[in-house]
Image (cartoon, helix red, strand yellow):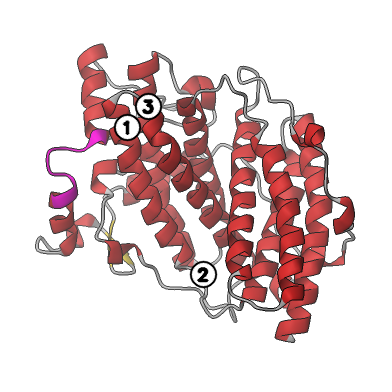
Amino acid sequence: MFNPMHKKGLPIQKQFKNWKTLNTRPYDKESIHPYSRTAGILMNGIECEAAFFMHNFARHTKDMELRGALAMVRRAEQEQQKMINWMIPGNESSLEVTIGYEQVAVDLTAFLAQKEKDPYVKEALDFALLEDFDHLYRYANLMRLTMGKEASDVTKEYTEITVGRPTSKEHRFPEDDVRNFTDKRSADPMSNLHIMTIVAAEQQTMNYYMNIGNRFEDMLARGLYLEIAQIEEQHVTHYESLIDPRMSWFEQWVCHELTECWLYHSLMKNDHEQRSQKVWEQALDMELEHLKIASENMKKHDKKDPEELSGGGFTHMFEFKSNIDYVRNILETQADFGAMGPDFVPGSKIPENYRYFQHQKIVNEGGAPSDEVIDRVIKKDGHDFRQELKPAMAGSVR
């Protein structure tokens, strides 16, 4: 068992790099392993979340020594973010990167759901899984329509591309995306890391779509990014509300650093590209020191033992891998699920006069871009684009 609390990292003063080192050589988009691409996307999101969190923390304290410590760690985290995100090549289009983002969402969420011990957190993961699964299908058809390219060129044979919970059905009344929060006193330490990971991933996806959706000239493409970016905002609400709000700033800081140590240690062990593995190894060496700094501040200010948050070490490693059977199982049993308040319920259990249907009428008045994309592809090619890697799913709908 790997316990980062007992490992020594690179001193913070030695972590800063020159511009040439930070300006990493991009990968070859044609030969990169799909799960090395997804690893980079995930860790970019993790590092962005670390910066956002520490900026907000700094805005909520007047302690100059603490603000200085946050600035030091945050600067190092931002250098890591640049090294990772700069691995994406300039000739990889925004839509190709988007397919990678949705492959992250599907296989990350499916992995976490299968490892999650808290039944309610698992329900939350399974619920949003089917929505990101459908987003992959919608973007794949946009790629076919606008680029004449198959999304499977990006995802390869690891992730299926077919209908999930239809995107146009995902638009819920805002209060129905707020979940019950976990109890920090009884939650499994790994649950905290799972939640921190999925919040960062969904937040990065939301931010990416918010900022690149208007870079397309085609109005349907702009509409699809607009629509799915709104769902990603729902997902951030959905997942962040699982975090126990009674956690102090210092407990959250330690959890952030533990999450980074967990992910970098995992990817260092199982990434498919040797060059990426070296990046993850260097990043882990840095994060161990960040964890030490966060832990020392937690002891000083909270008078609490950060070891309580680590649970003695990581009980499992994270891995990007194919989850076709698991996704199919959830799809077969929960495709029509909706939400009423914090609860997940079959669609047949939602009353006709419930606020969900009123909200649907408002946002989908005049049609939804996610439906129009499929209609346009079918009109053009005679069929939509799917990559069902096993015998066709019975009863899958558009």
Q: Position of residue 289 (x, y in %)?
A: 83, 60
User: Residue shown at 24%/47% (left/top)?
Assistant: 169
Residue range (magenta): 362-369
> Does the stretch in magenta take in 216?
no
User: Residue shown at 33%/23% (left/top)?
Assistant: 217
- Say which of 392 and 120 sits in front: 120
Return the residue at label 1.
Answer: 222
For marks 1 and 3 on the same chain, the one whose residue lies earlier in the sequence = 3
- SS of the residue under disc 2: loop
Amino acid type for the residue under numbered disc 1: Arg
Q: Are marks 3 and 2 in contact (CB under 8 Å)?
A: no
- SS of the residue under disc 1: helix
Distance of mark 2 from mark 1, alpha carbons?
Answer: 32 Å
Position of the C terminus, as image quadrant, is top left
Amino acid type for the residue under numbered disc 2: Ile
Would residue 254 be found to the left or right of residue 209 on screen?
A: right
Q: Nearer the viewer, mark 3 or mark 2?
A: 3
Position of the N terminus, as image quadrant, is bottom right
Binning the other alpha carbons within 10 Å of mark 1 as few (below 14), some (14 to 19) or many (20 upward) gives some
Q: Are marks 1 and 3 in contact (CB under 8 Å)?
A: yes
User: Residue shown at 39%/53% (left/top)?
Assistant: 233
For marks 3 and 2 on the same chain, the one whose residue lies earlier in the sequence = 3
